[in-house]
Amino acid sequence: MDEATGGSVTVQVRDAHVYYRVYEDPVPGLKQIFAEGQMRRRYRTIRAVRGISLDLHESETLGLIGANGAGKTTLLSAMTGLLPLESGSILGRSRPSLLGVSSALRPALSGRRNILIGGLALGLSRAEIESRVDEIIDFSGLREAIDRPMRTYSSGMRARLHFSIATARIPEILLIDEALAVGDEEFRHRSAQRIAEITSAAGSVVLGTHVMPEIEKHCDRVAWMDNGVLKALGDPSEVIAAYLSTVSRTGAS
């Protein structure tokens, strides 16, 4: 089930497969300890994304749902070019900006310094960043902690600041991985408003989260991933209902 939004395609995913290896450290026995050469490390191949095809349109917010390990984060990483494809293709009108709770910041530096670094990475000039520092701080709600090292922040505080930095310049394509599941109700409301600004400027958003009310409230379509494959794509209410029905039967989280 799928109904296109009618807008121009900003990201096209066709039969995308993403595999990666997970290495296991063997427990050495006496023969292995005294054997010549290095011990051979065993690995298994994880087929994290298997044959996904979908289009993302301008002025659209696409929800991405599924249990832990379904492949959502892997797909988002592949869409922004952080992970290579085993096969298939992902084409974008511009490079997507990936925002996630675990995205790397500079923990030894203050939140204020990270605003400068993040702004430069977005392509803003130093003068542009400095003119927006107070706006970014206020949006994040972290003024009392802004001059503390990032390593003293909770994961939620880091996610709030990163969202505020990443959307200081409205990106054409924004990929969000669980970042809206943090913060208080006021911050979630501000974040939703910022997403609306992006889509109203003919931008595109992919929102990956386990918070179903957020998905149903803000998304035009929903994609449900399960074990690396696309189970359903279409109307938010229908896809969410099908997903929750499966979760209740299997006891998955």
Image (cartoon, rainbow, N blue to C red):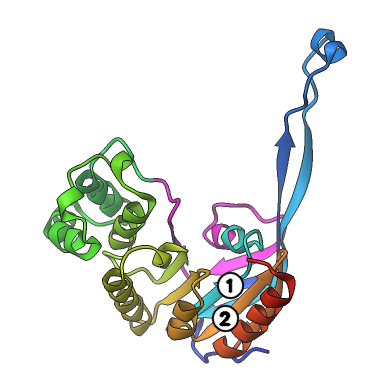
The verdict on residue 97 being magenta is yes
Residue 104 percent across, percent down from the top left = 41, 46
Residue at numbered disc 1: 65
Proximity of marks 2 and 1: CB atoms separated by less than 8 Å? yes
Q: Is residue 196 left or right of residue 44?
A: left
Mark 2 is surrounded, within 10 Å at the Cα level, by few (under 14), some (14 to 19) or many (20 or more) other residues, namely: many
Q: Position of residue 96 (x, y in %)?
A: 46, 64
Which label's residue is closer to the chain start, 2 or 1?
A: 1
Compared to residue 173, the image places residue 6 above or below, namely below
Q: Is residue 251 left or right of residue 201?
A: right
Highlighted magenta segment, given as a residue range: 76-104
In the rendered structure, which amino acid carries the disc numbered 1? Ile
What's the residue at 84%, 11% (across, down)? 30
Q: Position of residue 179 (x, y in %)?
A: 42, 63
Q: Which residue is mark 2?
A: 222
What secondary structure is found at the residue carrying circle 1?
A: strand
Image check: 240 left or right of 212? right
Q: Is residue 237 above or below residue 98?
A: below
Q: Is residue 11 visible?
A: no
Instruction: Residue at 30% x, 51% y: name it.
Output: 118
Which quadrant of the view contains residue 198? bottom left
Give the position of the N terminus as an image quadrant.
bottom right
